[in-house]
């Protein structure tokens, strides 16, 4: 903790995170117990407790991030979303099923399902706006501006494109959505910029995607091929046939090998993605980049799985923390900021938070 | 007056100032680096305590105090630091949320079941009728209606008419024969009644069928289908409200809900039996036929149970095949006894032998 960082003028910034597994295991245990005995209502406060810890463990240039959100804000946001979005939608669906002729039911279903998919994007955007507005560094808030509905509609359109292209638009969709978020984000009054015009913007992402795409296809071919070869499909028609332990053993071996292969392919693509997104982000003269490697993800995937299994799920918070910690530790910051010239954000952000994301069950984990 | 060094963020810019803080009885004096400010005690909140620092807030401004014995003593004396108060708040929150979840539980298990019957009674009959038609359409997706039942419909119509004349259930009765191997009959909202093909082969006389029909008309008269609809809708909405649609607590609530559901079903079954007995008497039939029908159904269930036990198959899925109205197994004896106690000599015949043959073959033509 340095007392003598330059109060004025440009400051060089390094991102660090010193969260410990023990702390997050303990938090996972007691927030889990409280969540259980309150019929899950405590989950909003649990998330707040965890974020406060995670944020404050994360320092940029020796000053920690600060999470100023409150559990009550998340709870109120959830109630608002339930009463203004979720219940009317469910009510319309149930009411239509009970009171309308079949054609009318179908029409209501289609409209509501389309609206639902748009609202998923809206919910993601609103959650992000809340989180940034509750993130403070050196007394100055972050801010997400832009239109939630616009984001929802664009995400919906990209989603359709991804379906039409059998998944091939997915990496482009992700990069474009990140750009939409980051180029509307601020630290105080200073805008982030997201530059996706850098050379090789999509090329490295798509190179790794090709492997991930065919790798996952290969996985399914492998597993279904093995099941077919072992006669699992013919057995299905004969309920009296006892499953063969040896065959199941072979299938599990194939599954295990397949999953390892799958994780390797997907991890490579994911690491490329993380590096690509990080190096597109800058704030003033500060340029971010990431050294996050395929092996980082592979190792995290394996060790986190073990961590969660051996702690009977209590370690899932610690597992999420470990991913965040690794991301922080692999971020490089180039350039310096004149912090005295960055002023407070204009807006205090929304008064309640993340309601829709919660109502739709999108905000899994931290 | 105790004084110590701290870092100060004014909440206007992101610059950091090194200051000297002096603690007095009514606030903190903050001086140094060109600043001269005063924080009143009532405006100060303790944001976060971690291993190294206390973070204090006053609006957007932040004061980061490194931990030291002197600073701790001074801040405690001013009650800026008050671990007892913070612990009380934290446990107060947990206690409050537990109380809230208990209140919600009370609504789920007591309030909603109690409100369901008055609500059902207040529902306009034409709305319930429309609801019943739509629900029947959905039920028929899983329970396929038997085809070419014109003769059977015509044969059974006089039985329904006689029962309705004895005690009007308040809705036009729409009777359907449906394909299902297990013997069962169900009454949905608004006078929709279904009889399974399994019931037609399990019962052995037309007055048993008339008795089962009378029992279902008893449900129609009590509007039990509508009651169940309200109860389940209320339960579903509250579940969504409490848990956001996920988690362990939801399972617990569902399980508990099942228990109340059963106990209410028991009361409704008893009432439907009483109505059925009156209807059968009014139509000149022997109410003891209801007891005979129950005994045949019980024999069917027992035979199935024995078969299950013999084959050693798990019975979890099999349980679903037990007719809804037989689930309250321990009560069945008293229900049989009640019907037997009302035995009289029949003055009418439910169906002629020829018509009984036609009805029994209702589902033979697909």
Image (spheres, rainbow, N blue to C red):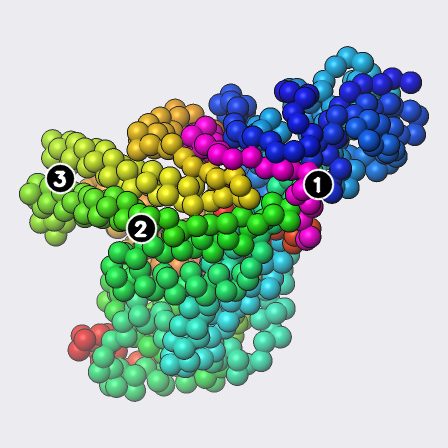
**Quick check: marks 2 and 1 in contact, CB under 8 Å?**
no
**Whether marks 1 and 3 lie on the same chain:** no
The answer to whether residue B291 is left or right of residue B302 is right
Viewer can see residue A165: yes
Q: Is residue B137 above or below residue A329?
A: below
Which range is magenta?
A: A321-347
A355 in magenta: no
Name which of mark 2 and mark 3 comes first in the sequence: 2
Chain identifier of the residue bearing label 1 in the image: B
Q: Residues within 10 Å of mark 2 (few under 14, many from 20)?
A: some
Of all residues, the one furthest to the top in this rendering is B69
Mark drawn on residue B13? 1
- For label 1, the crowd category at 10 Å Cα-Cα, with few meaning under 14, some 14 to 19 and many 20 or more, is many
| Residue at (77% x, 12% y) in the render | B69
Left/right placement of residue B66 relative to residue B272 reads: right
Q: Which residue is mark 3?
A: A242
Q: For mark 2, what is the residue?
A: A202
In the rendered image, residue B162, in percent from the top left (x then y), is placed at 42, 83
Q: Nearer the viewer, mark 1 or mark 3?
A: 1
Residue B340 in the image, given as x and y percentages of width and height:
43, 62
Using a 10 Å C-alpha cutoff, classify the residue at mark 3 as few (fewer than 14 neighbours), some (14 to 19) or many (20 or more).
Answer: few
> For this rendering, which residue is in front, A341 or A35?
A341
Mark 1–mark 3 distance (CA, rounded to whole Å): 72 Å
């Amino acid at each position: 903790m340095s007392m003598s960082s330059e109060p004025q003028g440009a400051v060089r910034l390094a991102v660090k995170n010193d969260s410990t597994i023990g702390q997050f295991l303990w938090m996972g245990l007691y927030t889990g117990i409280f969540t259980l005995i309150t019929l899950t209502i405590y989950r909003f406060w649990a998330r707040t407790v965890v974020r406060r810890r995670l944020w404050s463990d994360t320092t940029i240039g020796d000053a920690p991030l600060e999470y100023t959100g409150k559990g009550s804000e998340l709870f109120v946001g959830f109630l608002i979303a339930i009463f203004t979005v979720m219940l009317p939608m469910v009510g319309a669906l149930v009411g239509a099923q009970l009171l309308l002729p079949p054609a009318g039911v179908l029409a209501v279903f289609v409209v509501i399902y389309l609206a639902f998919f748009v609202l998923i994007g809206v919910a993601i955007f609103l959650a992000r706006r809340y989180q940034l507005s509750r993130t403070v560094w050196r007394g100055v808030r972050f801010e997400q501006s832009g239109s939630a509905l616009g984001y929802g509609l664009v995400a919906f359109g990209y989603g359709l494109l991804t379906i039409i292209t059998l998944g091939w638009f997915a990496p482009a969709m992700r990069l474009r959505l990140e750009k939409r978020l980051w180029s509307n984000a601020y630290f105080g009054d200073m805008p982030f910029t997201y530059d996706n015009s850098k050379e090789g913007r999509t090329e490295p992402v798509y190179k790794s995607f090709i492997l991930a795409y065919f790798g996952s296809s290969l996985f399914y071919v492998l597993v279904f091929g093995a099941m077919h070869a072992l006669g699992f499909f013919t057995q299905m028609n004969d309920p009296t046939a006892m499953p063969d332990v040896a065959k199941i053993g072979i299938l599990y071996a194939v599954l295990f090998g397949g999953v390892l292969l799958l994780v390797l392919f997907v991890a490579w693509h994911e690491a490329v993605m993380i590096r690509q997104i990080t190096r597109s982000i800058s704030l003033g003269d500060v340029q971010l980049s990431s050294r996050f490697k395929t092996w980082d993800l592979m190792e995290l995937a394996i060790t986190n799985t073990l961590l969660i299994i051996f702690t009977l799920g209590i370690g899932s918070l610690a597992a999420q923390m470990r991913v965040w910690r690794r991301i922080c530790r692999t971020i490089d910051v180039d350039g310096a900021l004149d912090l005295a010239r960055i002023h407070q954000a204009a807006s205090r952000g929304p008064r309640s938070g993340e309601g829709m994301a919660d109502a739709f069950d999108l905000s899994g984990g931290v | 007056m105790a004084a110590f060094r701290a870092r100060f963020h004014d909440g206007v810019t992101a610059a950091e100032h090194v200051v000297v803080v002096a603690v007095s009885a009514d606030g903190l004096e903050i001086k140094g680096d060109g600043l001269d400010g005063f924080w009143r005690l009532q405006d100060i909140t303790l944001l976060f305590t971690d291993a190294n620092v206390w973070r204090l807030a006053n609006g957007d401004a932040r004061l980061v105090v490194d931990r030291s014995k002197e600073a701790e003593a001074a801040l405690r004396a001013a009650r800026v630091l008050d671990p007892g108060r913070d612990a009380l708040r934290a446990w107060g929150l947990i206690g409050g949320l537990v109380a809230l979840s208990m209140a919600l539980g009370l609504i789920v298990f007591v309030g909603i079941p109690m409100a369901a019957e008055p609500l059902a009674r207040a529902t306009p009959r034409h709305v319930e009728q429309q609801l019943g038609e739509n629900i029947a359409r959905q039920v028929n997706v899983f329970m396929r209606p038997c085809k070419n039942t014109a003769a059977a419909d015509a044969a059974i119509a006089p039985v329904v008419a006689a029962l309705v004349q004895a005690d009007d259930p308040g809705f036009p009765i729409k009777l359907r024969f449906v394909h299902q191997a297990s013997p069962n009959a169900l009454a949905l909202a608004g006078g929709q009644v279904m009889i399974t093909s399994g019931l037609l082969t399990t019962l052995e006389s037309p007055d048993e069928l008339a008795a089962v029909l009378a029992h279902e008309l008893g449900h129609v008269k009590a509007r039990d289908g509508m009651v169940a609809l309200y109860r389940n809708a209320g339960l579903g909405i509250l579940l969504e409200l409490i848990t956001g649609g996920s988690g362990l607590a939801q399972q617990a609530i569902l399980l508990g809900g099942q228990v109340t559901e059963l106990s209410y079903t028991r009361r409704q079954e008893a009432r439907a039996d009483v109505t059925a007995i009156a209807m059968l008497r009014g139509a000149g039939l022997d109410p003891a036929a209801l007891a005979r029908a129950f005994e045949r159904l019980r024999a069917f269930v027992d035979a199935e149970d024995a078969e299950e036990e013999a084959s050693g198959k798990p019975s979890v899925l099999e349980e679903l095949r037990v007719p809804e109205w037989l689930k309250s197994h321990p009560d069945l004896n008293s229900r049989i006894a009640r019907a037997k106690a009302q035995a009289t000599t029949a003055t009418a015949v439910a169906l002629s032998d020829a018509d009984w043959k036609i009805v029994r073959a209702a589902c033979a033509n697909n």
